[in-house]
Image: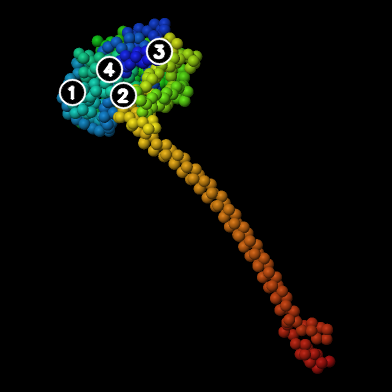
């Protein structure tokens, strides 16, 4: 049975990583008007609800999310200033949104990115591309390279602004992926969540250019404001009709909502409200502890079937799933793609897939593993795969771990001993101080007594007594007697 399961898993391995995650469920009776949509958990990339999320559509200005994020990702400094070239300013359709940039005008990258995201100016998006790649045309390959890197395989961009053009298309799911990646780019939120901006006068434009966001779900004064909205981007062209990307946070959940091909301005807002409300109200977080997930010890065999090592497979990190409220761990199905044995030199790619009771995929990802050598066995050759730890490295790490633990105990003991020694010597110093103080007091008392006795002795030695009469110092009794005798 296990061999049959292994064969089925190997047969599907080629398509495994190319497939995008299956939505949790199609949207219930929500009366959604937009042709395609997708709601994704920003943290995990898990799709909660969707319809036609892989259908290719013209994106319009939601393209600009990638334009701005890519410029920042490539090291763009918003304070940098640059001079606009002719194509940047004159390659957009007449009547399309712009901020009247002029050839030879010097602006900052911040000006260009704010005008791109807040005003949705097409000439500003061109300026961002010119800054990042030197010219607009050189920026397009960079955009498509990044799309492949983040897994947006059903998307291709032909310009940085989103105007209708052959070969410029995306999907609701890919736009979720693009936005999820962009949210992780440092500095992106400053522009993605901005509500207004004023562009200072330049060498070509003496007047300031103020502009404000038109995304009603971000504006508290508007009818379609959404509580918890953190950013977003709107789009409209003749081919795309209305498109919208909105992110919102409530509690510990941050969701990315994309709706495409909406008939009217207000339809896209109504649909986004319904989709976000449904997900926040009906989904919650279920945490799966890594220690509770299954571990595997898979033998490594050579060409003769002899065991020469083993592969230890385990989950290293907890997995947080967004599930329908009320779902418990016992309601989930865990499918491990782990064979009975690995052939020496073969690729190692264990993985885990988690589905709910309806078979909807909630999670799919790789598992961590370590390769170790059996005692007396030949050393395995270099392994293909995501992780490899040589036995000597494993031993060294173990020794370092134990050494670190022993060192920690010794340091703790040293500090404890130092504490008690210092307290002991403090007591001794205090006792010596008290003794010195007492001795000083006794000495002072003895000296005081001695001075008093000396004073009394001095006084007693200076008195004169004669015929039972005591005379004060300086009085001579014989003089008194002589003088008195002559007077009588």
Image side of residue 284 versus residue 117, left or right: right
Q: Please name the colour scheme applied to the rendered image.
A: rainbow
Quadrant into which the C terminus falls? bottom right
Residue 303 bears which disc, if any?
2
Report the Cα–Cα distance between label 4 and label 2: 38 Å
Q: Quadrant of the N terminus?
A: top left
Q: Nearer the N terminus, badge 4 or badge 2? A: 4
Above/below status of 399 relative to 317 = below
Nearest-to-viewer mark from 2 and 1: 2
Q: Nearer the viewer, mark 1 or mark 4?
A: 4
The disc, 3 or 4, on the residue closer to the chain's N-terminal end is 3
Q: How many marks?
A: 4
Nearer to me, 237 or 74: 74
Furthest residue toward bottom: 486
State the residue in front, 156 or 7: 7
Going by the image, does 142 lie left or right of 26?
A: left
Name the disc covering residue 137, or none: 1
Mark 1 or 4, nearer chain start: 1
Which is nearer the eye, 306 or 353?
306
Residue 232 at what x, y percent from top left?
34, 20
Horizontal arrangement in the rendering, residue 456 relative to residue 436 (left or right): right
Q: Give the mark toward the camera: 3 or 4.
A: 3
At horizontal 19% and vertical 18% (from top left) the residue drawn is 92
**Which residue is label 3 attached to?**
1
With respect to residue 162, does 411 lie above or below? Answer: below
- Distance of label 1 from label 4 (alpha carbons): 21 Å
Image mark for residue 153: 4
């Amino acid at each position: 049975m296990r061999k049959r399961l292994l064969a089925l898993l190997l047969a599907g391995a080629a398509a495994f990583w190319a497939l995008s995650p299956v939505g949790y469920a199609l949207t219930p009776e929500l009366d959604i008007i937009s042709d395609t949509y997708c709601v994704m958990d920003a943290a995990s990339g898990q799709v909660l609800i969707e319809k036609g999320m892989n259908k290719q559509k013209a994106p319009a200005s939601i393209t600009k999310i990638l334009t701005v994020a890519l410029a920042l990702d490539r090291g763009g400094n918003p304070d940098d200033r640059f001079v606009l070239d002719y194509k940047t300013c004159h390659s957009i359709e007449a009547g399309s949104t712009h901020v009247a940039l002029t050839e030879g005008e010097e602006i900052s990258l911040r000006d260009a990115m704010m005008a791109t995201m807040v005003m949705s100016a097409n000439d500003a998006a061109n300026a961002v591309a010119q800054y990042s790649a030197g010219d607009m045309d050189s920026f397009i390959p960079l955009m498509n390279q990044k799309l492949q890197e983040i897994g947006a395989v059903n998307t291709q961009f032909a310009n940085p602004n989103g105007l209708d053009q052959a070969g410029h298309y995306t999907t609701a799911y890919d736009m979720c992926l693009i936005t999820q990646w962009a949210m992780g780019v440092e500095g992106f939120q400053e522009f993605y969540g901005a509500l207004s901006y004023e562009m200072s006068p330049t060498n070509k434009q003496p007047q300031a250019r103020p502009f404000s966001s038109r995304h009603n779900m971000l504006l508290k004064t508007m009818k379609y404001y959404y509580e918890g909205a953190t950013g977003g981007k709107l789009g409209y062209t003749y081919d795309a009709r209305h498109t919208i990307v909105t992110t919102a946070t409530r509690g510990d959940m941050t969701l990315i909502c994309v709706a495409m091909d909406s008939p009217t301005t207000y339809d896209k807002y109504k649909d986004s409200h319904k989709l976000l409300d449904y997900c926040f109200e009906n989904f919650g977080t279920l945490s799966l502890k890594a220690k509770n997930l299954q571990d595997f010890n898979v033998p490594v065999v050579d060409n003769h079937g002899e065991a020469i090592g083993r592969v230890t497979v385990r989950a290293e990190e907890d997995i947080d799933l967004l599930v329908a409220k009320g779902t418990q761990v016992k309601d989930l199905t865990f499918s491990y793609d782990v064979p009975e044995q690995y052939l020496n030199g073969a690729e190692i790619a264990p993985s885990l897939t988690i589905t709910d009771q309806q078979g909807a995929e909630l999670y799919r990802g790789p598992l961590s593993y370590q390769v170790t050598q059996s005692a007396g066995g030949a050393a395995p050759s270099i392994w293909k795969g995501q992780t490899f730890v040589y036995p000597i490295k494993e031993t060294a790490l173990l020794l370092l771990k134990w050494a670190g633990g022993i060192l920690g105990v010794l340091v703790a003991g040293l500090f404890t001993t130092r504490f008690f020694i210092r307290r002991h010597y403090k007591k001794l110093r205090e006792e010596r101080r008290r003794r010195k103080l007492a001795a000083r007091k006794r000495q002072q008392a003895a000296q005081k007594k001695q001075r008093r006795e000396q004073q009394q002795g001095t006084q007693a030695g200076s008195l004169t007594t004669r015929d039972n009469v005591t005379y004060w110092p300086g009085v001579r009794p014989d003089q008194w007697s002589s003088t008195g005798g002559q007077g009588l």
